[in-house]
Image (cartoon, grey):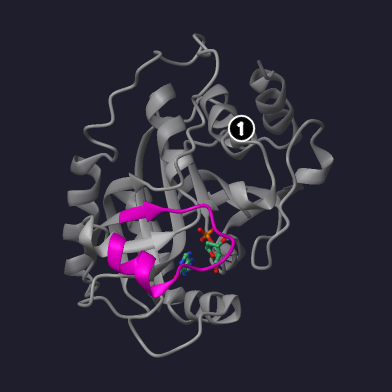
Amino acid sequence: MKDYKKLAKHLLERTNVKPEFALILGSGLGYLTKYFEDSHAISYSELEGFPQSTVEGHAGRFVLGKFHGKNVIAMDGRFHYYEGHEIKDVVTPIYVFKEMGISRLIITNAAGGINRSFEPGDIVAITDIINFAFRNPLIGPNDERYGVRFPDMSKTIDFDWLEKVEKTAESRGIKLKRGTYVWVTGPSYETPAEIKAYEFSGADMVGMSTVPEIIAARHCGINLIAFSCITNMASGILDKKLVHEEVVQTAQRVKSAFSKVVGIALEV
Ligand SMILES: O=P(O)(O)O[C@@H]1C[C@H](O)[C@@H](CO)O1
Ligand code: HPA
C-alpha cells in the first residue's frame, strides 16, 4: 500500500497553501493555472514515488494557489493508463488529495463528442460514466484506510453542486450540456464502428481518462463534479481524421468559458 500521507505532507510543507479544492486539468486545459494568484508549482519529478506525465498538453506538475478566492491544488497534467502506468498509479493523486484534507474535486478532460447535438467547443457536465476500458483501480486488496470493498457508484457526481454551477453559469450566459462519458484505454482513437457501439450503449462523449479518478474519489469519499470539453466529434461522425493537435487547439479556443465554469464551481 502506498504512503499517500507522506506525499500529502510533502506537498503541504512545500507551500503555505492549504487547498480546499483539487482540480484535474485535461488535455490542453493546463492554461487555467496561469490565472492562479500566489501560485507555487511543484513538478511531479520532484516527488519521490510519483508517476510522471508523458502526454503533450500535460505539463506534469502540481500548481497550488488561489483561484476565484479559493485555495486550490491543480494537476497540470494527469496520468493515463495508456501511458503504461499501473492503474493504481493513475489514481495516486486522488488518495494524496484525500490525505491533504480535500473534500471537493473538479475533474476536467478533453473528449470526443458522440451525441450529435454536441459540437466542438461545448462544455458538458458528466452525469454518468461507462467503463469500456474494463480496468478498475480498486482491483487487488482493498485499502481499508480509505474506503469499502464495494463502493456505491449509483451517483458518480455531486448533483446538488452541479445544479448550482449550471444555474450560475446560465445567469452568466454559459449554457452547460450534460452527458455520459465512456472511458476507453486508447491511445489509438476509436474506429467508427466502436463509436456506433458506444452511442448505442448510451454514451454521449468518449475519452481516455477521468473514470479511474472518479472511481477512486467515490471510494475514498471525495465529492466531485466533472466537465468534458468537446474538442472534436468522435470518429466517423464527421468525415475527418482525429489528431491530438486539434484536441489541444479546441481546448485552448474555449479558454474563457471553461475557466469561467471552473471559477463558478469554486464559488457556488
Ligand atoms: O487527459 P484528457 O482525457 O483530457 O486527454 C484526452 C484523452 C487523450 O489523453 C488525449 C487524446 O487526444 O486527450
Ligand atoms: O475522440 C476522442 N476519443 C478519445 N479521447 C479523446 N480525447 C479527446 N478527443 C477524444
Image coords of residue 10 (percent x, y): 74, 28
Q: Which residue is drawn at 37% across and 65% down?
A: 194
Q: In this view, does 66 lie above or below 121?
A: above
> As drawn, is 70 to the left or to the right of 74?
left
Amino acid marked by disc 1? Thr
Q: Which residue is drawn at 64% across and 35% down?
A: 89
**Considering depth in this image, is 62 or 243 the residue closer to the camera?**
243
**Considering depth in this image, is 53 or 19 the residue closer to the camera?**
53
> As drawn, is 165 to the left or to the right of 230?
left
Seen as rendered, the residue at the extreme front is: 193
Image coords of residue 211 (percent x, y): 42, 44
Q: Say if the magenta span includes residue 132.
A: no
Q: Mark 1 points at which residue?
A: 92
* Crowdedness near tag 1: few (<14), some (14–19) or many (≥20) residues, C-alpha within 10 Å: many
Asked whether the viewer can see residue 145, the reply is: yes
**Considering depth in this image, is 122 or 143 the residue closer to the camera?**
143
Magenta region, residue range: 181-197
- Which corner quadrant holds the N terminus? top right
Q: Residue at x 29, y 38 (%)?
A: 156
Asked whether the viewer can see residue 204, the reply is: no
Q: What element carries label 1?
A: helix
**Res 181 quadrant in image:** bottom left
**Considering depth in this image, is 23 or 136 the residue closer to the camera?**
136
Q: Is residue 86 above or below residue 255?
A: above
